[in-house]
């Protein structure tokens, strides 16, 4: 540990994604947990929303003995509804789940207080704003209660709040418990993501955008207002990449104090014979589902490709991925069979009963199922952008085509009804992954990919892509990562370069591909949390110093 940093005695970190696997922040926190636990055993405390019996809480391990006296105090006071336990990830850190429903009736009062104290404009709020903000307020109250009950006045305490959804927690503590040093991390600005998602030229025009004006135009004043005030008032404001730092400075009017890139941990990746066994299992599962959906055997040496992430059609480059697959299926240089999977959660209506029946009974098939592009039925399938583009490109998934494309539109948590295998246990079976992002503040999916030894293709509009370039990788797929330059105007050039990289992989011999997988893991080792945690240590130090200066100034 760098001794020049002042270290906290207690760390609270809160997010909507603590024990709630819905996005990349879950991966940030869950993989960081063991490194934090090693340094601050049971003094790193995560705070998340209590979703009751929801299946998303399956990795929460209840433990009523954890902080038991404080729990009794909370129960007696009636001020909060909490549960304590541990997060079932390496390190098993303490977790406090907070149920915000008792505060729901005070919504207007809480939002007025935020306006009065910090000029947070919640007037035009809609969607998930209310639920997120009431939870953030309750998280702030939980930290305050813990602090006062355990008399931590003589301790150095920091509280980190992730994304706009927890912004009110940071502001609550500044108002009600100023001795706690607050950190606020934006993983992507709400306005920047919306500009990109609405097909506006984010990067070409970044210097001319006014965040407040764009928030009004895009009808997201409330989220933007909250995010901006949290960034301005936190004792330390951070973001996850250099590319997002530029966005923050322009759209929020505040450059991040520190960039805290996202790491990963090797303990999520099997090794040795277990790795080989897991990879063989994953390939078998992927090929089996594809063969039953397509009604024909898949060559055991088929190339398995995938893209994954949040359903942001343009931002994640899903349109580019489909175009690349269309280009490859018409390329005479592609001599091996390819199965391309789009692993992106959508509005699932139900598991396909026909596909599930065939899988469960190992029913022999020799004809494709209807709509042989999709493993689950969707609500309003006719309006789904991924399916529409696949059909527009006239994919058939028939035997004569060397490349078939399959949309897996569900969260791969291990109980999706078709694979019933968690995401990482399928990722390990891929031969390559493709993430042609237009908007990607960091890019966990390509980092996860190389950590599992899977070569990946991404762009320099992803924070991870820029980091890989700094580490001397990305020039060609033989390095394990191919980082392609992308801007507002070179869509088809990006598609062509991705296709060429896939063709290169398709002709590699066994020794060459094994060497590429080794280079993947070598690069991933440079992004482990034991290297990246120093950025957080610097952030904790800055927050503690700024909080001390702030409280002394007002003493």
Image (cartoon, rainbow, N blue to C red):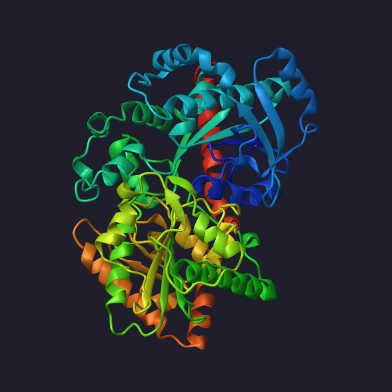
Q: How many badges with numbers are in the image?
A: 0
Q: Position of residue 306 (x, y in %)?
A: 44, 65
Q: Quick check: 494 left or right of 474?
A: left
Q: At x 31% / y 51%, what residue is drawn? A: 385
Q: Position of residue 78 (x, y in %)?
A: 68, 14
**120 w.r.t. 464: above or below:** above
Q: Vertical placement of 479 versus 38: above or below?
A: below
- Foreground of the two, 403 or 306: 403
Q: Residue at x 50, y 20 (%)?
A: 553
Q: Please tell me which residue is depicted at 44% across the width and 48% down the height of the picture.
A: 240
Residue at image x 27%, y 31%? 215
Q: Which residue is at the front of the view, 151 or 444?
A: 444
Q: Eyeballing the image, is 329 above or below 370? A: below
Instruction: Say if residue 324 shows up in the picture.
Output: yes
Left or right side of 242 for 90: right
Tell me residue 516's x, y (percent). Answer: 49, 78
Front position in the image: 304 or 141: 304
554 or 443: nearer the viewer: 443
Res. 195 image quadrant: top left
């Amino acid at each position: 540990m760098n001794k020049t940093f002042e270290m906290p005695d207690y760390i609270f970190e809160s997010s909507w994604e603590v024990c709630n696997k819905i996005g990349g922040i879950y991966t940030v926190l869950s993989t960081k947990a063991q490194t934090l636990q090693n340094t601050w055993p049971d003094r790193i405390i995560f705070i998340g929303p209590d979703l009751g019996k929801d299946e998303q809480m399956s990795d929460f391990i209840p433990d009523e003995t954890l902080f038991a006296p404080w729990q009794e105090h909370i129960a007696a006071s009636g001020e909060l509804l909490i549960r304590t336990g541990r997060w079932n990830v390496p390190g098993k850190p303490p977790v406090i789940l907070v149920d915000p429903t008792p505060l729901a009736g005070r919504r207007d009062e809480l939002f007025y207080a935020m306006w009065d104290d910090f000029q947070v404009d919640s007037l035009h709020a809609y969607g998930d704003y209310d639920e997120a903000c009431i939870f953030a307020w309750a998280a702030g109250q939980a930290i305050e209660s813990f602090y006062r009950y355990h008399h931590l006045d003589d301790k150095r305490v920091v509280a980190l709040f992730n994304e706009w959804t927890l912004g009110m927690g940071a502001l609550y503590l500044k108002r009600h418990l100023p001795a706690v040093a607050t950190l606020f991390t934006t993983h992507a600005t709400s306005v920047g993501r919306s500009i990109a998602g609405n097909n506006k030229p984010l990067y070409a025009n970044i210097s001319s955008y006014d965040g407040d004006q764009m928030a009004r135009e895009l009808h997201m004043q409330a989220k933007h207002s909250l995010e901006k005030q949290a960034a301005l008032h936190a004792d330390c404001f951070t973001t996850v990449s250099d590319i997002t730092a530029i966005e923050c400075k322009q759209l929020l009017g505040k450059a991040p104090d520190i960039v805290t890139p996202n790491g990963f941990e090797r303990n999520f990746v099997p090794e040795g014979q277990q790795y080989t066994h897991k990879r063989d299992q994953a390939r078998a599962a992927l090929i089996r589902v594809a063969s039953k959906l397509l009604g024909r055997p898949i060559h055991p040496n088929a190339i398995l490709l995938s893209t994954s992430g949040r359903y942001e059609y343009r931002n994640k480059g899903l349109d580019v991925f489909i175009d690349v697959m269309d280009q490859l299926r018409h390329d005479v240089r592609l001599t091996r069979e390819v199965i391309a999977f789009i692993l992106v959660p959508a509005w699932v209506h139900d598991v396909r009963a026909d596909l599930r029946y065939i899988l469960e009974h190992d029913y022999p098939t020799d004809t494709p199922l209807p709509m042989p592009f999709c493993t689950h039925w969707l609500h309003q399938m006719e309006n789904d952008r991924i399916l529409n583009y696949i059909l527009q490109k006239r994919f058939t998934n028939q035997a004569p085509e060397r490349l078939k494309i399959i949309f897996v539109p569900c969260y791969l948590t291990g109980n999706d009804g078709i694979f019933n295998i968690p995401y990482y246990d399928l990722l390990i079976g891929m031969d390559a992954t493709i993430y042609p992002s237009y908007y990607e503040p960091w890019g966990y999916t390509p980092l996860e990919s190389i950590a599992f030894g899977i070569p990946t293709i991404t762009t320099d509009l992803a924070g991870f892509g820029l980091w890989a370039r700094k580490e001397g990788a990305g020039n060609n797929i033989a390095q394990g990562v191919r980082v392609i330059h992308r801007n507002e105007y070179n869509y088809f050039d990006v598609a062509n370069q991705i296709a060429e990289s896939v063709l290169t992989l398709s002709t590699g011999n066994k020794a060459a591909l094994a060497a590429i997988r080794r280079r993947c893991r070598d690069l991933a080792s440079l992004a482990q949390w034991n290297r990246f945690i120093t950025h957080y240590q610097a952030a904790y130090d800055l927050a503690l110093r700024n909080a001390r200066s702030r409280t002394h100034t007002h003493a």
